[in-house]
Image (cartoon, grey):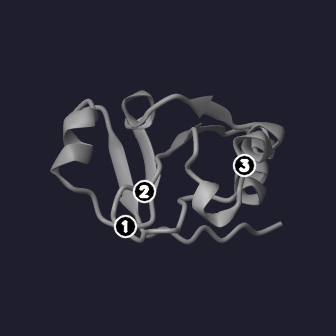
Amino acid sequence: MWIGVAKEIKDNEYRVGLTPACARELVSRGHQVMVQAGAGAALGLSDAQYEAAGAKLAADAKAVYDRVSRSRSHNHANWRCSSLGRSSMHTCIWPRIVS
């Protein structure tokens, strides 16, 4: 499965859809993860941490919006970036990884 993580755009929004640890776990289970550059910066999570976890970096939201995990609801700007009919968007997900 392809999983995309875009940077949050709402004022005073500091959450991120996936941490590097979650990205590492998903990649280890065969998923492909793409993270927008700077998505975790507000929490002190660097792009290098995501890359080390096996995620690919995307330069901007347009490059990642076909596979998006966000911590807040989507707005019209988000939908304009997506390829409607191809996207699967989820909000407020809490994955439970069971060994």
Give the residue at x 26% y 30%. Answer: 83
Q: Nearer the viewer, residue 13 or 50?
A: 13
Q: Left or right of 40: which side holds 14?
A: left
The residue that disc 3 covers is: 46
Residue 65: percent from left, percent from top: 38, 37
Residue lying furthest left: 76
Q: Quadrant of residue 43?
A: bottom right
Q: Residues within 10 Å of mark 3 (few under 14, many from 20)?
A: some
Q: Is label 2 or label 1 in front?
A: 2
Q: Considering the numbered disc 2 on the image, is that residue within a helix, a strand or a loop? A: loop
Q: Quadrant of residue 86?
A: top left
Which comes sooner in the sequence, label 2 or label 1? 2
Q: Left or right of 86: which side holds 99?
A: right
Quadrant the C terminus occupies? bottom right
Give the residue at x 83% y 40%. Answer: 52
Residue 32: percent from left, percent from top: 64, 35
The answer for how far apart the CA atoms under marks 3 and 1 are is 21 Å
The answer for how far apart the CA atoms under marks 2 and 1 are is 8 Å
Dot 2 amino acid type: Glu
Give the residue at x 78% y 40%. Answer: 48
Q: Considering the numbered disc 3 on the image, is that residue within a helix, a strand or a loop? A: loop
The residue that disc 2 covers is: 8
Q: Left or right of 40: which side holds 55?
A: right
Q: Considering the numbered disc 1 on the image, is that residue within a helix, a strand or a loop? A: loop
Residue 9: percent from left, percent from top: 36, 55
| Mark number displayed over residue 72 | 1
Dot 1 amino acid type: Arg
Which comes sooner in the sequence, label 2 or label 3? 2
Which comes sooner in the sequence, label 3 or label 1? 3
Dot 3 amino acid type: Ser
Q: Residues within 10 Å of mark 2 (few under 14, many from 20)?
A: many
